[in-house]
Image (cartoon, helix red, strand yellow):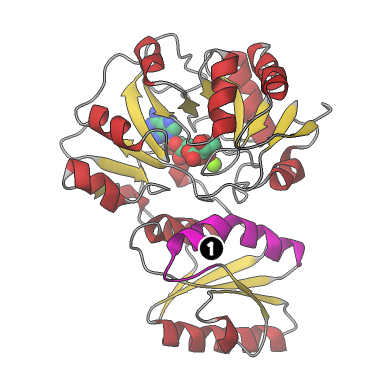
């Protein structure tokens, strides 16, 4: 059991001595959780196979699920990838730092322990001062999956990280809540058409402004085999059983009231994940609004913390409303599908 240090850091002007202490841990092969614009990451030296092994152990992560490597300057790419796929230069210029992860062919300096044996490496540059300063001070790229126990909702504040990883990692840099709230978009440019392997914080529509047509990995549909190893696992799962209701909003509300009624009469504690527009409509259940349907960023940034909140409230069943798949809505719906274990009712 490690002693996990929780350290508050200013997100706009990170204190250099705190960043240096964290960087020292990374260089020595230890693990530091840090904030990014998407979710908290669990960081270790990406060039150190033993650090990667520690990350898998701390999270209880399946061995075949590769890690994302984080850099703070484009010039770092040269040392770690064989080449830059067509289209990537323009994307990096436009969207880095930001919630976009791109696949590259890796150089041998990236150990196979970091990429779960794949010859590709997923790389991104996070849009967060603390993350960028930490990578810079460490002087090495940092491998970082989301800083949660594998399968649970990703952490969007330091308390969530502590809840999952206290005693398993060396340090947590507390930089407040993560503004985007869902993980980065993972993009594969190696084929004839750019392919989204995981929808995320950078909307498909934004990518299409630069790349033209972009496809979503058909393997992400229920029952299919996704290309990105991590996407095949149950994920983001609250302790409660969860049902997602999709369709016209009025019908969603009616269905959820109906379901909540029968669950409550059989003695179940019911949580309803509503929206700003609909929260007043429910006469029963523990109703929480996840955000505003007209501002999907308010929903993405709250999603995982609401799932964790329902767990803390001890609900047995979560009934969630579906939202539009436009913009960030695509990533939100992908997370809701998985959180519900594909337990979906269409009305
Ligand atoms: O926003 C994010 O991406 C966060 C923050 C911390 O940066 N990180 C994150 O990492 O979400 P993680 O490990 O929770 O998810 C990584 C995803 C997995 O679905 C994994 O399978 C995929 O990226 N991935 C990583 N390397 C890959 C590769 N070489 N080929 C295909 N998929 C890859
Ligand atoms: Mg994750």
* Image location (x, y in percent) of residue 205: 27, 53
Label count reads 1
Q: Is residue 339 visible?
A: yes
Residue at 57% x, 59% y is: 302
- Compared to residue 30, the image places residue 95 above or below, namely below
Residue at 75% x, 83% y is: 267
- Compared to residue 317, the image places residue 142 above or below, namely above
Q: Secondary structure at mark 1?
A: loop
Residue at 82% x, 26% y is: 2
* Image location (x, y in percent) of residue 116: 48, 25
Ligand 2's quadrant is top right
Image quadrant where one finds the N terminus: top right
Give the residue number, with chain letter if any, for mark 1: 340
- Left or right, residue 131 beside residue 117: right
- Compared to residue 257, the image places residue 61 above or below, namely above
Q: Nearer the viewer, residue 347 or 25?
A: 25
Residue at 67% x, 82% y is: 285
312 falls in the magenta region: yes
- Compared to residue 324, the image places residue 157 above or below, namely above
Quarter-wise, where is residue 48 in the image?
top right
* Image location (x, y in percent) of residue 280: 59, 86
Range of magenta residues? 291-313
Residue closest to the far front: 13
How many other residues sit within 10 Å of disc 1, few (<14), some (14-19) or many (≥20)?
many
């Amino acid at each position: 059991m490690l002693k996990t240090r929780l350290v508050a850091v200013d997100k706009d002007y990170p204190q250099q001595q705190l960043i240096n202490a964290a960087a020292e841990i990374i260089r020595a092969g230890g693990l530091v959780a840090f904030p990014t614009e998407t979710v908290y990451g669990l960081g270790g030296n990406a060039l150190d196979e033993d650090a990667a092994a520690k990350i898998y152990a701390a999270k209880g992560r399946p061995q075949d699920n590769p890690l994302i490597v984080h850099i703070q300057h484009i010039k770092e790419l040269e040392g770690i990838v064989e080449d830059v796929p067509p289209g990537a230069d323009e994307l990096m210029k436009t969207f880095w730092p930001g919630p976009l992860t791109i696949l590259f062919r890796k150089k041998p300096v990236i150990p196979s322990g970091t990429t779960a044996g794949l010859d590709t490496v997923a790389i991104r540059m996070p849009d967060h001062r603390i993350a960028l300063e930490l990578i810079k001070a460490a002087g090495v790229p940092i491998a970082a999956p989301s800083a949660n126990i594998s399968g649970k909702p990703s952490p969007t504040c330091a308390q969530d990280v502590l809840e999952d990883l206290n005693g398993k990692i060396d340090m947590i840099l507390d930089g407040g809540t993560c503004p985007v709230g869902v993980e980065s978009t993972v993009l594969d440019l190696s084929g004839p058409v750019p392919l989204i392997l995981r929808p995320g914080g950078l909307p498909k529509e934004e990518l299409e402004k630069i790349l033209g047509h972009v496809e979503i990995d058909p393997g992400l549909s229920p029952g299919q085999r996704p290309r990105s190893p991590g996407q095949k696992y149950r994920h983001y799962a609250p302790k409660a059983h969860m049902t997602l209701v999709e369709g016209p909003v009025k019908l969603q509300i009616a269905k959820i009231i109906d379901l909540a009624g029968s669950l409550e009469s059989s003695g179940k504690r019911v949580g309803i994940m509503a929206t700003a527009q609909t929260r007043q409509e429910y006469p029963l259940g523990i109703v929480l609004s996840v955000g505003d349907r007209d501002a999907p960023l308010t929903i993405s940034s709250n999603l995982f913390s609401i799932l964790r909140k329902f767990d803390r409230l001890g609900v047995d069943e979560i009934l969630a409303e579906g939202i539009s798949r436009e913009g960030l809505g695509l990533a939100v719906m992908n997370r809701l599908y998985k959180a519900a274990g594909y337990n979906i009712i269409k009305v």
